[in-house]
Amino acid sequence: MREIIIAPVKMSDTTAQPESVRDGARAHEVLRKFRVVFSTVKNHFRDVELKCGVSGAQLWAISEIAENPGLRVSQLAQAMSVHLSTASNLVGALEKKGLVRKERGMDQRVVFLHLTQQGIETVSRAPKPMIGVLPDALQRLPKDELDALGDSMDKLIVMMLVKDETAAAKPLSEI
């Protein structure tokens, strides 16, 4: 994966500029950082597709199953922070690809998920982090910084005139 480094916007004499111009420059700088995040996520998903033949969400799902053999679909949904139907659809696609198999428990309504040999091989050649670069980075942030970022994202979402709140329960690779 390519490494992209972005330098902060340099302003010659920001004190001589009106506040709205300085704020506009800062907004552009932050926008550039969003672009770096989006591009990095997109490039990671492209690498996953090329190396494994699965989407980023599918790789995350099989990595969760690899770490927790016998995982239930509801547990997978919780681990990936997606809607139950989204996790169920992911499992269906993985089963069709021959990467996951379902096992019924004593109670026939309960399904346990396991990787097939092909699923194990897919996980072994997958680029890291298997959960994705953004979820991995978020998990590694200190709690106070993650809380501050979450608060700032809440404010940003409120400020947006058009928003797709349904995206909150979808994997990034499917947005």
Image (cartoon, rainbow, N blue to C red):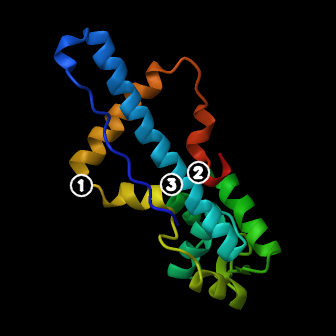
Callout in the foreground (3, 2): 3
Report how far apart the C-alphas of labels 2 and 1 lie in the structure. 22 Å
- Above or below residue 68? Residue 32 is above
Residue in view at x 63 percent, y 54 percent: 173
Q: Are marks 1 and 3 in contact (CB under 8 Å)?
A: no
Asked whether, in this view, residue 169 is left or right of residue 3, the answer is: right
Q: Which mark is residue 36?
A: none
Which mark is first along the chain, 1 or 2? 1
Callout in the foreground (1, 3): 3
**Residue annotated with mark 2:** 172
**Residue annotated with mark 1:** 142
Asked whether, in this view, residue 168 is left or right of residue 108, the answer is: left
Q: Percent from the top left, x then y, of residue 155?
A: 38, 26
Which mark is first along the chain, 2 or 3? 3
Q: Nearer the viewer, residue 40 or 145?
A: 40
Q: Nearer the viewer, residue 60 or 46?
A: 46
Quick one: label 3, few (<14), some, or many (20+) residues within 10 Å? some
Report how far apart the C-alphas of labels 1 and 3 lie in the structure. 21 Å
Quick one: label 1, few (<14), some, or many (20+) residues within 10 Å? few
Amino acid identity at mark 1: Pro
Q: Which element carries disc 3, helix, strand or loop?
A: helix
**Residue annotated with mark 3:** 40
